[in-house]
Image: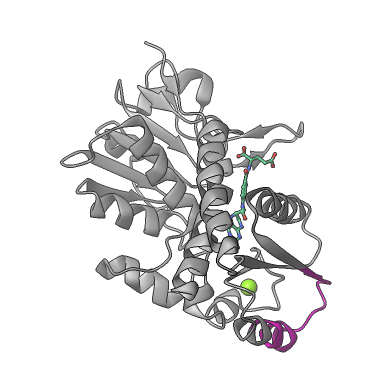
Amino acid sequence: MTAQLIDGVALARQWRARVAERAAALAARGHRPGLAVILVGDDAASQVYVRNKVKACGEAGIHSVLETYPASLTQDELLARIAALNADPTIHGILVQLPLPPHIDAQRVIEAIAPAKDVDGFHVANAGALLVGQRGYWPCTPYGCVKMLEHIGIELRGKHAVVIGRSNIVGKPMALLLLQANATVTICHSATADLGHFTRQADVVVAAVGRPRMLTADMVKPGAVVLDVGINRLPDGKLCGDVDFDTVREVAGWITPVPGGVGPMTIAMLLLNTVEAAERAAG
Ligand SMILES: Nc1nc2c(c(=O)[nH]1)N[C@@H](CN(C=O)c1ccc(C(=O)N[C@@H](CCC(=O)O)C(=O)O)cc1)CN2
Ligand SMILES: [Mg+2]
């Protein structure tokens, strides 16, 4: 059996078109959605991601402002910029691209963003809202994974989902979203003994560890859905996921590629959260 591919590029395109319709409807009422993107430092990958975000905004009819600062920017200077954007009525979403330079406390910066404008869903108020099932903003990568699972029509109730990774931006929110969909959820991480013991029981595996091709075919139950959140740059410059795609695709029922899987959905969900924030502000 060869797994069916979940095409993140095509699904993201569909979501971006839906966002564009909602943005146009808001603009017609005089409420053009606006996103501020802040980049500190010169991380090459981050530069690509913020450029892609700004471009995607333009295509969806979302106004965007890109603020780039040198790595020498102080934390207080960054906090002052966020305070100004919090007070700017033309801006509905604010995101600070991660990672930040080491002299800046990322969590302190995230907590400075008004929760209503935190379209990354990283603020503790949004994390708490997800935990207790209240309305808030969901982090874009796990949100994109949920949309992919909905798209393939898998019923999660009673299924066993294994999340590999426990970061605040992917692993933990992913586990909570799967739990909300009535899956039985196991979180595995770097200290998990015998990872394969867990993943072999999984109907859904979400790999978000940042270790190239660590999930191999012998660790996957035949027919399972495998979502690969990893984006690893190999020494030869090629990109690969956390999943050993070529072998796992022979066992899994569904699989996401890297590139072209979860990554494009992350940006589509950022746009969705931004248009949602603008709708909420417009009333
Ligand atoms: N403030 C944030 N910082 C970071 C986030 C985030 O959601 N908010 N996530 C990641 C980076 N990221 C978005 O910011 C991101 C990474 C990758 C992709 C993507 O589409 N990747 C492509 C491949 C791109 C390439 O060639 O390098 C793919 O998977 O097809 C989108 C968004 C960390 N920081
Ligand atoms: Mg830091």
Residue 223 position by quadrant = top left
When the figure is inspected, residue 243 is found, relative to residue 189, above or below; the finding is above
Q: Nearer the viewer, residue 170 or 191?
A: 170
Left/right placement of residue 74 relative to residue 201 reads right
Magenta-drawn stretch contains 75: yes
Q: Which quarter holds ligand 2?
A: bottom right
Q: Which residues are magenta?
A: 67-82
Residue at image position (27%, 48%) is 186
Whether residue 210 is visible, yes or no, is no
Q: Nearer the viewer, residue 52 or 17?
A: 17
- Can you say which quadrant of the picture contains the C terminus? bottom left
In the image, residue 20 sits, relative to residue 124, either above or below, namely above
Residue at screen point 42% across, 44% down: 145
**Vertical comparison of 199 with 117: above or below:** above
Is residue 247 or residue 123 the one in the foreground?
A: 123
Give percent across and percent down for residue 141: 49, 51
